[in-house]
Image: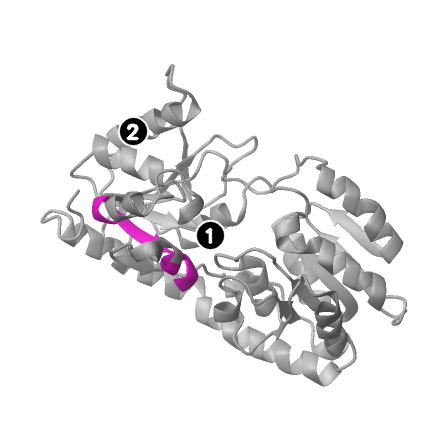
Amino acid sequence: MAATGLRVMTVLSPRERFAPGECGAIGLLVRRLAGPGEVVVGTAPQHASFAGVAFRPVPPVFSWRGGRVRYRKGVARLIRENRPDLVEVHNRPDLALALRRCFPSLPVVLVLHNDPCSMRRARRPAEREYLARAVAVVAVSEWVRQRFVSQGVGGCVSILPNSLDLEALPAPLPPEQRENLLLFAGRVVADKGVDAFVAACAELLPRYPGWQAQIFGADDFGEQTRETPFLRALRPQAHAAGVELVGYRPHEAVLDAMSRAAIVAAPSRWGEPFGMAALEALGCGAAVLVSPNGNLPELAGQAAVYADPDSLPELVAGLESLMTDASLRARLGQAGQSRAARFDCRTMRAIRAELHAEVVRAWPGKGLFSA
């Protein structure tokens, strides 16, 4: 049982697979934060789920109304069987609201990892107003919270940042022993600015023959990824630029590369709701370049170089400043590790447990949860 004595059930979205090599950033976060006695539920993975955390696959339940309803009914069945004190739903406002209706006396926490304005049952201001009254809403960053309350939406939204297990990170190499490597790690999609990274490398690598560049990642999480049109178009560009497309690798391999690389780039075009890859790079002691979009400035502060991915001269100049200045890389690497220490999972686990306890205390009187 958790330190607060609560029986917590954490519900993943249907796309997540709670197993090594199959889950994405949300599943990894849930694994880091899970307390004693907590049960994680989600779609059955192909392989064994993570050790050390109780997992229950959502059972198949018949419904004519499609996959969302089948999944919701399966989760409801597990709630009836396990009788938790609190349910935490990740990134699915529609599922959180459905469970609230099914179990009105059961406290429901909704954790938002992405822009809620693009989510089912949260796109319109009136929907978010209702959502904030119906369940306890938690955002992973101030940027996500601001998106939730945009357009004049009222309601209480707590913030619980994503976290790192600092003790599980590979020992970072000292600056003088790091490889002359420009590294991109993340989903290989336009939103992440990976094509801008390739274009910048095409200019820089011929000037600095002692450097190399690699891209770790694919179109999605897990070993079974697609060859998307974007990825097909990127392959010849990367080859011409001298950038190695490594493909999908397990999370541990990505962290190992970050601990060896001199520079890690996260030039996202979209508003990053949090910036987990950037946080991992900071924790691994790399010199980090990020874009000024979304939560990245709040996350990295003064511990990174900033560049607009849609300005090739700016991106080239930012990377080149790091490639040519070893002392700058060393300073940023040290600052990045100090910055990442603020997000240690042991601290966040305690904050999360207290947040859960506060929600349970407030729920009987409904308080803000008046729907």
The reply to whether the C-beta atoms of the residues labelled 1 and 2 are less than 8 Å apart is no
Going by the image, does 70 lie left or right of 266? left
Q: Position of residue 147 (x, y in %)?
A: 39, 56
The residue lying at 77 percent from left, 74 percent from top is 320
Up/down of 27 relative to 330, above or below: above
Q: Secondary structure at mark 2?
A: helix
The number of callouts visible is 2
- Res 4 → quadrant: bottom left
- The CA distance from mark 1 to mark 2 is 23 Å
First in sequence: mark 1 vs mark 2: 1
Up/down of 207 relative to 2, above or below: below
Question: Which residue is denoted by mark 2 in the rendering?
Answer: 76
- Whether residue 181 is visible to the viewer of this picture, yes or no, is yes
Q: Position of residue 325 (x, y in %)?
A: 75, 82
- Res 74 → quadrant: top left
| Residue 251 forms part of the magenta stretch | no
Question: Which residue is denoted by mark 1 in the rendering?
Answer: 29
Under mark 1, the amino acid is: Leu
The residues colored magenta run 132-146
